[in-house]
Amino acid sequence: MKSATLRTGADLARAGLAAESQVVALDAVGTEYSIAIPSGLAALIDPADPTDPIARQFVPDPAELIRADDELDDPIGDETHSPVRGLVHRYPDRVLLMPTLACPVYCRYCFRRDRVGRAAGTPTAADLEVAYRYIEEHPGIREVILTGGDPLSLSDVRLARIVARLNAIPHLNNLRIHTRVPVILPDRVTDGLIAALTSDIPVWMALHTNHARELTDDVAAACDRLTRAGIPLLSQTVLLKGVNNTVDALTDLMRRLIALKVKPYYLHHPDRARGTAKFRLTLEEGRALVSALRGNISGLCQPTYVVDIPGGHGKAPAQDVTPDGALPGRWNLRDFRGQTHDYADNDG
Ligand SMILES: *Cc1c(COP(=O)(O)O)cnc(C)c1O
């Protein structure tokens, strides 16, 4: 298959991933939320399976234009902790740096879906310089986490420049890159990319992946190139209804990750991003799934299940939440400073 990216309703129909009758509705979704599916990833979808877990994550759905009452534009509160454009400083010793808002694939459940793939909000070179200076002026920052957008959608030259600039900041202990690229575009993991990431301070990489079927032999080879280059690999997975909300799906995914030398790091409770109701499940359901994994599969396979507290208070370990009184589906979430926040389950 020719390496192209599906971006429109017509592209999706031509690839057999949408009916002709849906083209107009899908283009309407595209004006609100970016659409991109690289053809290699599209080829993993079984068009005859209406419950295909890969299709569910990436093929747009007209229902995305329906906004539920509890959904937010900025569900994890990036904006409240962004002192300069392109940088989020929520925790004392680490910051997120978002050098791009573009991704090679757009996930339909993305919590930054209101921003990704749009020119507005993308930091300019001057914005990035302001962000670097912010990091330089805050010696308590020990780690810079490149995210976005997908940082590995940048060219090798731009990545090398960012890594070199951060390397020159003496109080940084390590860099971290959160990306989907090795999973959805494994051929992008070239010698040139690895050279661009080579740095005096360690670069850790967290791969975003939600289903074992994403982890093809080509992905295994990409992971191998990264681990041989001395880049430790972690994973982060979003718990998504209809994609991976079964003990079997999670078991297969975590075991496959360990086989690729990727340590499962976080399992995220789905955020309340606009138009994502079909993916949400309750904390009760998520906690039961995670409890079922514990002990039955290797301790290496156990990610930490976390829920981002709406409003920007950070992540709370979801196995530690406490019920809020006698009301079903009401919880108290504790942030890292010890403050508790009310949370109401809503499975959409
Ligand atoms: C999730 C997150 C981090 C990283 O948290 P870790 O627990 O270190 O993985 C850092 N900053 C922000 C704003 C985050 O949302």
Image: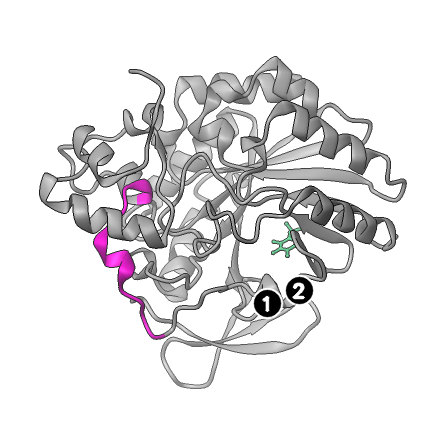
Q: Position of residue 230 (x, y in %)?
A: 69, 22
Please say whether residue 61 is one of the residues in the magenta stretch: yes
- The magenta segment: 57-69
Q: How many labels were placed on the picture?
A: 2
Mark 2 near ligand 1 (CB under 8 Å)?
yes
Whole-percent x and y of residue 53?
A: 28, 40
Question: Is residue 150 visible in the rendered structure shown here?
Answer: yes
Instruction: Say whether marks 1 and 2 touch (CB < 8 Å).
Output: yes
Which numbered tag is attached to residue 312? 1
Residue, disc 2: 81
Mark 1 or mark 2, which has the lower sequence index?
A: 2
- Which residue occupies the foreground of this view, 287 or 150? 150
Horizontal side of 128 relative to 309 (left or right) equals right
Name the disc covering residue 50, or none: none
Name the quarter where the C terminus is drawn: bottom left
Is 85 within the magenta? no
